[in-house]
Image (spheres, rainbow, N blue to C red):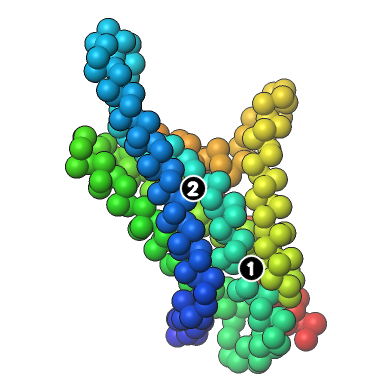
Amino acid sequence: MHNTFWIYRRELTSFFFSPIAYVILAAWTVLMGIFYSGAFLSYAVVSMQLARNPQAAAQYNITPTSAVLEPVFSSVTVILLFVAPLLTMRLFSEEKKQGTIELMLTFPLRNGQMFAGKYLSVLSIYLIMLAITFVYPVILSAFVNVDWTIVSSAYLGMILTGMAFLSVGLMASSWTSNQIVAAMVAFMILLATFLMEALAISASEPLSSILRHLSLGMHLRNFIRGIIDTRDIVYLVSINILCGFLVLRSLEYYRWRG
């Protein structure tokens, strides 16, 4: 536990002492703010139009949570497609490039402890990023009633989805000593899961269902609608387990080769 905490504190400190930390946090805040502002203004315009036409309003069942927050939460997967590789690209690749990983492997430090410390550090950063977005439902609740059950479900889904994205990035970083290559590999793997959803549209059953299930973005949709499906949880957790296993095998191979 002490070794894990040492790695965790080391990575977290290193991240916030680099300019990329503030660039990523700023970009995340700006992009999420743009999505929220657009959804909020669109809902305000539609609400005003429906208020002038009670008959049309009766035909639509638009809630603030679904009209404003759902599009914002859905955008998280798209932003993570670019942010997750940037957050994770240096975690193992930089150690290999600088040769510090050989020194770390000589310590009484297990591969699992090294992986856990790095994973928890980047997960903490992601949770900070998610905490920033919590201001959006709070602002919305000042004007309309917000379904906090759906909001809680959405945040659970975003946490699990983010964990899956980050684990893919860590896996890619453990395969190479080049940060750019690590980021590109993680990006291509994550992009492939998005393309599976597009391919599922033209595919026939049962291939269509399989491709949809393999798409990471698809599993967040149920959460942001307030539906907690154990199949979504199992799939996202399985991605973490699989990527963690491959990272440990990569470190074991590197230790054995060294």
Q: Secondary structure at mark 2?
A: helix
Can the viewer see residue 240 in this picture?
no
Name the residue located 47 percent from the left edge and 51 percent from the top edge.
31
Q: Secondary structure at mark 1?
A: loop
The one of 57 and 110 positioned closer to us in this rendering: 57
User: Which residue occupies the extreme right position in the image?
Assistant: 257
The one of 25 and 244 positioned closer to us in this rendering: 25
Name the residue located 48 percent from the left edge and 80 percent from the top edge.
17
Give the image location of residue 69, x and y in percent. 37, 39
Relative height, residue 103 to residue 135 (above, below): below
Tell me the number on the disc at residue 76: 2
Tell me the number on the disc at residue 156: none
User: Which residue occupies the extreme top position in the image?
Assistant: 55
Can the viewer see residue 144 in this picture?
yes
Q: Amino acid at mark 2?
A: Val
> What residue is pinned by disc 1?
89
Distance from Cα at disc 2 to Cα at disc 1: 19 Å
Give the image location of residue 170, x and y in percent. 62, 66
Q: Amino acid at mark 1?
A: Met
Give the image location of residue 245, x and y in percent. 64, 64
Name the residue located 67 percent from the left edge and 26 percent from the top edge.
201
Relative height, residue 140 to residue 180 (above, below): above
Name the residue located 52 percent from the left edge and 74 percent from the top edge.
19
Relative height, residue 58 to residue 129 (above, below): above
